[in-house]
Image (cartoon, rainbow, N blue to C red):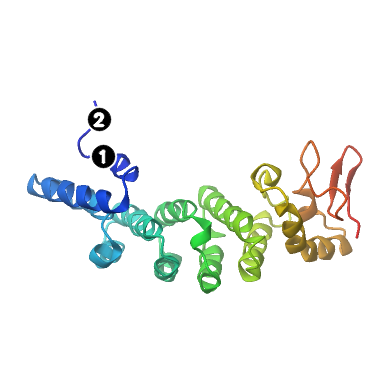
Amino acid sequence: MTSPFSESLLEVLSRSHAADEARRMAATLREGGSREMRVLGFESFLPGAEVREQLVEATWRPAAEDRAEAWPFLIRNADRSGDPEAVTAVLEEMGRLRNEQDPVREAALGALARVRPALFTEDAEPHLDRIAVQALDSSSDTRYHLSRLAVGVLREHAASGRRELVNWALRTLVRISGNTGAADFGRLDHTLRRGQEHQVYEALRPWIKAGAEKSDYSVSGTLCVPEGFRLFGRGVAVCRRGGVRTSG
C-alpha cells in the first residue's frame, strides 16, 4: 500500500498542486514528531522563495548524514523551479563542497547530474568548473556522477551555440579520462535529433583535430559506435574494423 507521505507522489503533480500537498504533508509530519530532515524533504517541494533559506541552512548542519540529504533537497528544489538563475545560485553554494566528505559530495553530484541541462547557462560555467575540479579527487562514484553531468551538458548545448558550456563539458570529460582511457560521451547517435550531429561535430572539431596532431584519438574514438556515427562523410572520426580516421 502506498504511503500517504511520499515524495514520489509529489513528483508527478503540477508545481502548484505539489506545493500545496507538500505543505500539508510537512505540517502533519511535524505535528507527529517526525525527524526534521524528513519534514524538510517535503518542504523542498515548496517554491524557492519560501524554503531556500532553510534548505541552505541544512547544508551547514553538523552531521554529514544530514548534509548528504540536504544538498539534494536544495538542488532538486532549484531544478523544479525551472529558473536558470536559481540553478546558478545553487552551483555557487556548491563551491563549499571542496571541504566536504566524499559521501556528501557524491550525494550532491548525483542530484546535480539529474538537473535538466537546459537550465545551465554560461553564467554557470565557472561554478561548474570549480565543482568539477573538486570532484576529480573524489571516489569513482562521484566521478561517475560528474561524467553524467558533463555528457548531459554536452548533448544539450553542443547545438545551442553556448561554447563555454560545451568546452567545459569536453574539458571535464578529458580530465576524467586522464591518460588511461577515452572519455565516455555515451551513445550520442541515439540521443541527438536528426541534423543535430553536424552541429555537434562543429563543436567537437577543434578537440578532434588538436588530438589528431598529437596522435591522441581519445576524443574521436569515443564517437565510434558499432554501426558508425551518423557524422560519416562530414570529416569526423569514423569507426570501422580498420580503426579510427579523421578527415577534413
Identified by mark 2, the residue type is: Thr
Q: In the displayed structure, does residue 242 sit left or right of residue 119?
A: right
| In the image, farthest residue toward the left | 31
Q: Quadrant of residue 3?
A: top left
Identified by mark 1, the residue type is: Ser
Q: In the displayed structure, does residue 130 sit left or right of residue 49?
A: right
The structure residue drawn at horizontal position 56% and vertical position 68%, both measured from the top left corner, is 129
Q: In the displayed structure, does residue 6 sit left or right of residue 79?
A: left
Q: Which residue has dot 2 on it?
A: 2
Closer to the camera in the image, 186 or 190: 190
Label 1 neighbourhood size at 10 Å, few (<14), some (14-19), many (20+)? few
Question: Which element is circle 1 on?
Answer: loop
Q: Quadrant of residue 78?
A: bottom left
Q: Quadrant of the C terminus?
A: bottom right
Is residue 212 visible in the rendered image? The answer is yes
Q: Position of residue 206 (x, y in %)?
A: 79, 66
Q: Position of residue 77 (x, y in %)?
A: 34, 57
Question: Which element is circle 2 on?
Answer: loop
Q: Quadrant of the N terminus?
A: top left
Relative vertical location of residue 85 with respect to residue 243 in this rendering, above or below? below
The structure residue drawn at horizontal position 61% and vertical position 53%, both measured from the top left corner, is 151
Q: Position of residue 198 (x, y in %)?
A: 76, 56
Closer to the camera in the image, 94 or 98: 94
| Badge 2 vs badge 1, beta-carbon distance below 8 Å | yes
Q: Which residue has dot 1 on it?
A: 6
> What whole-number distance in Å separates the C-alpha atoms at marks 2 and 1?
8 Å
Is residue 60 visible in the rendered image? The answer is no
The structure residue drawn at horizontal position 27% and vertical position 56%, both measured from the top left corner, is 63
Label 2 neighbourhood size at 10 Å, few (<14), some (14-19), many (20+)? few
Closer to the camera in the image, 198 or 70: 198
Closer to the camera in the image, 31 or 61: 31
